[in-house]
Amino acid sequence: MNALAATSRNFKKAAKLLGLDTKLEKSLLIPFREIKVECTIPKDDGTLASFVGFRVQHDNARGPMKGGIRYHPEVDPDEVNALAQLMTWKTAVANIPYGGAKGGIGCAPGELSVSELERLTRVFTQKIHDLIGVHIDVPAPDMGTNPQTMAWILDEYSKFHGYSPAVVTGKPIDLGGSLGRDAATGRGVLFATQALLEEYGKSISDQQFVIQGFGNVGSWAAKLINEFGGKVIAVSDASGAVKNLKGLDIDKLIRHALENRGIKGFSGGEAFDPKSLLTEDCDVLIPAALGGVINRENANDIRAKFIIEAANHPTDPEADEILSKKGVIILPDIFANSGGVTVSYFEWVQNIQGFMWDEEKVNSELKTYMTNGFKYVKEMCKSHSCDLRMGAFTLGLNRVARATVLRGWEA
């Protein structure tokens, strides 16, 4: 089941639990605005190339819209719609004053030179500059984009509107980016895991972890879990998988992965088939790579007691049902990986204040948000007697619905 189908299925279930008015429910699903623009640039060899850029702005009842910009050859409008919608619920669950958006350009960033990417980013910004803004829609990096892309958007936007560092987040530190942003999603995963384990009278230090994916989120999560005494016994990425039942040396593994562009060939553990990683025997499984990896084919064989969804949509709804029958506790992506967008919010706040925080403050504020977030999700679980995923969805949906009605939505 793709991300769009799964998101609307979860939305419908949550709307039913909340007893939402059907007209309101329909209105919440329809995006506020969809933008599609043509971006033509001269390439380095002098020929012209045209690309399609777009932005889906889903909802702004709770504040400016927020979401990533991706550069990818197959940008599917349906998927972007689903991701924009998911951002609306995610920012509401995180309790930060934003709505949801998502966008990008259909291009293969690996096939464009740096100067071509810069020209493309600037043309895209010229086309949408009057539809984004500090209090309208605040983009961020996503697949195929990075802090440099955000710097170009900031510069181009500022030509029209004056210096506006808060128009994008995920910027380089030198241009008003926030300290702690790089580790934010992984650190959020740590705080979310701590909150969940505490609920069951356990702590990080007495659990064994398996992590799928060793990019930004997976490697930071592994490093921080390791620092808190957790034992990471197996890890995989696109290059391969490695396990060591005594616990992997995470710092060495991170160095190896950087030097060799992947964990393959790491000497501090034995290599094994990455396909069997999800079914390794462990206490906590953290999928931090692609969506749809836990499905009806492998759900029965999963031996973890807890699953923390650091990736977006790693568990198919069919697998959800199988796992809940087995008593596996799943902490949903919409809460578990919201550390990144929460620290993006902190970056925006710092830019608006014109006053930057030290890293300690960023991390302690993040901990407060994640800990309180878990408490609110649990309260929704109790009042609607549902699992954590529905607890999070009903929490997010309820906050957006209430803001919509309070602002004067006529039934």
Image (cartoon, helix red, strand yellow):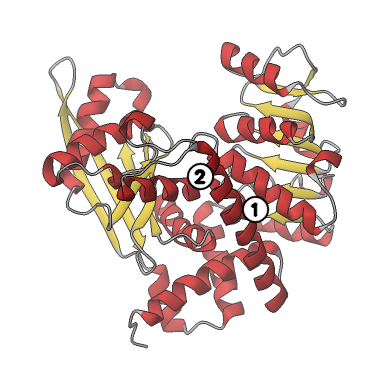
Q: Is 90 left or right of 186, judged from the image as shown?
A: left
Residue at 37% over, 88% down = 411
Q: Residues within 10 Å of mark 2 (few under 14, many from 20)?
A: many
What amino acid is found at the position of numbered circle 1 in the picture?
A: Asp
Residue 231, given in percent of the width and then of the height, sits at 81, 32
Residue linked to disc 2: 340
Q: Which mark is residue 316?
A: 1
What amino acid is found at the position of numbered circle 2 in the picture?
A: Gly
Residue at 53% over, 58% down = 94
Residue 3, given in percent of the width and then of the height, sits at 53, 53
Q: Residues within 10 Å of mark 1 (few under 14, many from 20)?
A: some
Q: Is 14 left or right of 113, judged from the image as shown?
A: right
| Position above or below: 209 against 203 | above
| Position above or below: 278 against 96 | above
Q: Is 114 left or right of 50, judged from the image as shown?
A: right
Q: Is 163 left or right of 84, judged from the image as shown?
A: left
Q: Quadrant of residue 304?
A: top right
